[in-house]
Image (cartoon, coloured by chain):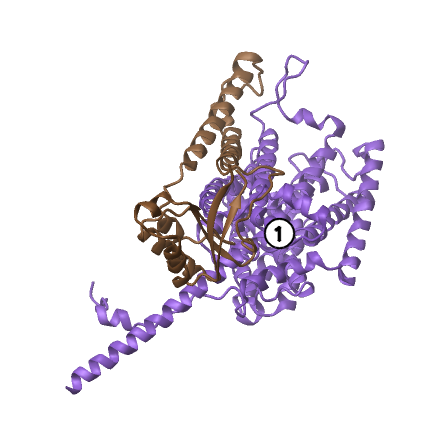
Amino acid sequence: MTGVSIPSKSQFHQAPMLPPPKWVEGDPSLQEITDDVLRPMEGLPGRAWWICFALSAAALTMGLSMIGYLFSKGIGIWGENNSVGWAFDITNFVFWVGIGHAGTLISAILLLFQQKWRTSINRSAEAMTIFAVMCAGLFPAIHVGRPWLAFWLFPYPNQRGPLWVNFRSPLVWDVFAVSTYFTISLVFWYLGMIPDLATIRDRATNGIKKLIFRWVSLGWDGSHRTWSRYEVVSLLLAGLATPLVVSVHSVVSMDFATAVLPGWHSTIFPPYFVAGAIYSGFGMVMTLLIITRNTMNLERYITMRHLEAMSKVLLLTGSIVAYAYLTEFFSAWYNGNIYERYTFFSNRLAGPYAWCFGIMVLCNVLTPQMFWFHRIRGSIPALFVASILVNIGMWFERFVIIVLSLHRTFLPAEWGMFIPTIYDVGILIGSFGLFFTCFLIFIRVLPMIAIWEVKGLVGELRVHDRLVSNLRTLRADQEDGTQEAACA
Amino acid sequence: MPRRFLVACFQEEESLLNAVRTVRGKGLKVYDVFAPYPIHELGVAMGIRKSRLPLAALFGTLSGLLVAIGFQFYANVLDWPMNVGGKPDNSTLAFIPIAFELTILFGGLITVAALLVRTRLFPGKHEHLLADGITDDVFALALRQPDRRAVASALRQSDVWKILEACGAKDIYERESPP
């Protein structure tokens, strides 16, 4: 214990007090917070919103018409072939599920860890999660061939025996994991919104609006007896959702890890996929928040400190992802299996799709390392570009894992190439259209910042400030007293 | 019979907390407190008992676990055993992921349902606000009228008003709520 000195009681009392971090800029009154957050909902949308909405609605329409064509022709219109039976569809599925990980991570795990910075970003991140999981669910549904029979994925009593689904298959686990994740995220999102829906109800002057919000706010009256139970349930849900976040992408990774294919058959997949999911999710949250804070004047609530905190999460998870890439290469080399070595060293590094691997490394390994520098973390344009690169990189990561492992397997006679058709690309763009259309409608019709949580944070800060000033006065009085005693 | 309440409105959470402590110190019973956000010290100040909702979560999670394990066992072993890759009918380990997911699904849904039942929140319920602006920036304290304890401790109505005013209440009034 040498070298460690325990501060005496007086030293302890005189230690400088660190102010708690300010996650809301300025010192807005409670009413100002309500006004600021609800302003975008109460006025007419600006030109920027209409342009974004038109673009995403157009992309969505294009995607939907291509899906209609797909239903009439079958999945032969995609670029899949006998060698590469899984390509864009599953890549997009894993990509969107991954993006969906940030929302519940922010609302559940950061709540358990008492990270205050989650308060002004959790609502929009949760909404993003729900829309991303919707986009994800689209791809397996349209890939089953006869999508009108997609409900066969669930075990329901049927007239074919009943013939149950194969519970040993990771693909069935996926159905349960993703639908549970969607349901719990939706419930968590809605539950967190009830007090804010009541705020909108009480401000509404329009009869229909009041009626709708009365219906959805469940008669919330701000009673503390309700609040205290509500907070207990929020914590319980956070506790339940935390392992859920980790489980979903672990289960998704088992779709691959339980196969014997080199490039897929790997025990590090679950943690590797979870880290990648959080990485891509935070990338997407960052992209969306930078756009919304600037176009909707919410800089006071979504501050640079929030963006900086997120970039640190990107740095951490990006580094875990980079470490996982290295581990994959090391195991391929170390286990001596010629197929593993071929898949990683000859095919990924130098094969026909090496450029995809290059993009992946550039975006996922090198880009997050930029966040070591304070100047980059503090620059909006740099953060914006980096967040988009993160998502490009993560899409390519899934493409590399899936297509590069499938197109050259054990028998060279089975080798082939995958070339996407216009329908592959079109439906991918269409899924972005679905995502952004939903998000743009969300920021117009629902509060995109949790008003009551921000108010609680501001209230807590105020109490803290008053406590500190009281303590300061007390200390000054004490010092005066000791000086007087010394003089006497 | 409509219930009558004495409502005191505050602009700061600290004055509200102070009022709750003072009023309870005088032996009066706090009917409820209304606030735009949860104030953590209020639970102790109001003497609210620990919630039993975690038990609902425990019940939900356990039922999810049992249903999932039980159903997979029933479907794969009792109802229609299928040979998939020579694996045993009762592949318990392979049933774990679905059991885990359903544990969480049942736990979450049952906990939220229990909350809604306990706090009597349901779609379309007409809200009864005892003060205007409590979903915005007003903190309110409500006391039942007439309070038997106040009668017992010989506190007059005017005394209660004075106590609330001294605690910083901006507005004090009586209001009736529908039964």
| Residue B15 visible in rendering | yes
Say few, some or many: other residues with alpha carbon within 10 Å of mark 1 (under 14 / 14 to 19 / 20 or more).
some
At 40% across and 68% down in the image, what residue appears?
A466
| Residue A94 visible in rendering | no
At 56% across and 72% down in the image, what residue appears?
A375
Residue A338 figure quarter: top right
Chain shown brown: that is: B
Count of all numbered marks drawn on residues in the image: 1
Q: Judge by depth and name the residue closer to the eye, A84 or A368.
A: A368
What kind of element bears circle 1?
A: helix
Name the residue beneath numbered marker 1: A202
Q: Judge by depth and name the residue closer to the eye, A113 or A350.
A: A113
Q: Judge by depth and name the residue closer to the eye, A408 or B9.
A: B9
Tell which subunit mark 1 falls on.
Answer: A
Residue B158 figure quarter: bottom left
Residue A487 % position (x, y): 17, 87
Residue A42 % position (x, y): 70, 57
Placement of A252 over or under A395, stated as above or below: above
Q: Quadrant of the N terminus of chain A?
A: bottom left
Quick one: which residue is furthest to the bottom in this view?
A487
Residue A423 % position (x, y): 81, 42
The three-letter code of the residue at mark 1 reads Asp
Chain shown purple: that is: A
Asked whether, in this view, residue A352 is left or right of residue A195, the answer is right
At 14% across and 86% down in the image, what residue appears?
A488
